[in-house]
Image (spheres, grey):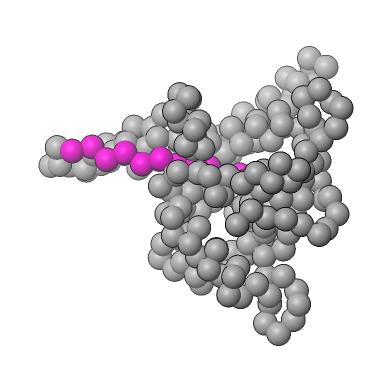
Amino acid sequence: MIEKRETEYRGTSTFEEAKRRGKIGTYLSQDYLLSLNSPTLRSEVREATHKEDWDKKVDLLWTYQRENDTSEISKWVEVKRDRRRNTSHRFIIETCSNELQNSAGWFQRTEADYLHFVIDEDESIYSTPMSLFRQWFETESAERPFLGNTRRERFPLETRRTPLKNRTGFYVSLFRLISLDDVQEGLGSNFRQHHVPELFAKWWAEEKALDEAEKTIW
């Protein structure tokens, strides 16, 4: 079901800003998957740049082959990055991409096999099978929408505004915030944390260089 809201707007960012932040997350995930290469596992990863990839709403195609196995296995990966600090709600999912058009968010539309949450604060990539995560969230939202006996929402709503390209207005997207404890309890071993500080250090440096370059241009 597509999300509708009854709250005020909470943030504004341009499409270009969000896209660049997401790109760094994609590169982090790509490097992590390639780091899995070993004598018993050969991995290849490419960005989802073809039109048919875009229709699937995915970011990476991960292809791997195990030792003594002649067949290759391919998996689609969706990557989401969050740079926020000091929050228990580590994970953000988009439930409506455009409130005015009542269009589904990436959470409903992606055809990914795996979902990667790239969380800067933890210097970690959290991975889970997309189908299991979606099923868990939809079930919990329907059966346990509040915290205990309170009326506080278990998955708080967040809204974001993105300026239109012609700068004449903006559109609003709706998100739900999910805590780390909730996901770990619900998915157990199907939700894994990969702590990779060396990869974050590498791409934070790249991101800082891009920020400095933009300041020079403007």
What's the magenta region?
71-82
Residue at x 50%, y 58% (from the top left corner): 134
Say which of 44 and 172 sits in front. Answer: 172
Q: For the C terminus, give its image quadrant.
A: top right
Quarter of the image holding residue 31?
top left
Magenta stretch: residue 72 in it? yes
- Residue 26 versus residue 188 in the image, above or below: above
Residue 166 position, x and y percent, is: 81, 22
- Residue 157 versus residue 204 in the image, above or below: below
Residue 67 position, x and y percent, is: 17, 42
Quarter of the image holding residue 90?
bottom right
Total labels drawn: 0
**Residue 193 seen in the current view:** no
Residue at x 72%, y 55% (from the top left corner): 4
Q: Is residue 72 left or right of residue 36?
A: left
Q: Is residue 129 left or right of residue 95?
A: left
Magenta stretch: residue 135 in it? no
Q: For the N terminus, give its image quadrant.
A: bottom right
Residue 46 position, x and y percent, is: 41, 29
Outermost residue to the top:
217
Say which of 109 and 34 sits in front. Answer: 109
Q: Is residue 45 left or right of residue 197?
A: left
- Residue 176 versus residue 140 in the image, above or below: above
Residue at x 57%, y 38% (from the top left corner): 25
Q: Is residue 29 left or right of residue 161?
A: left
Say which of 126 and 197 sits in front. Answer: 126
Residue at x 43%, y 48% (from the top left corner): 114
**Residue 61 seen in the current view:** yes
Outermost residue to the bottom:
149
Q: Assign the magenta stretch its main secondary structure.
A: strand
Residue 97 position, x and y percent, is: 67, 43
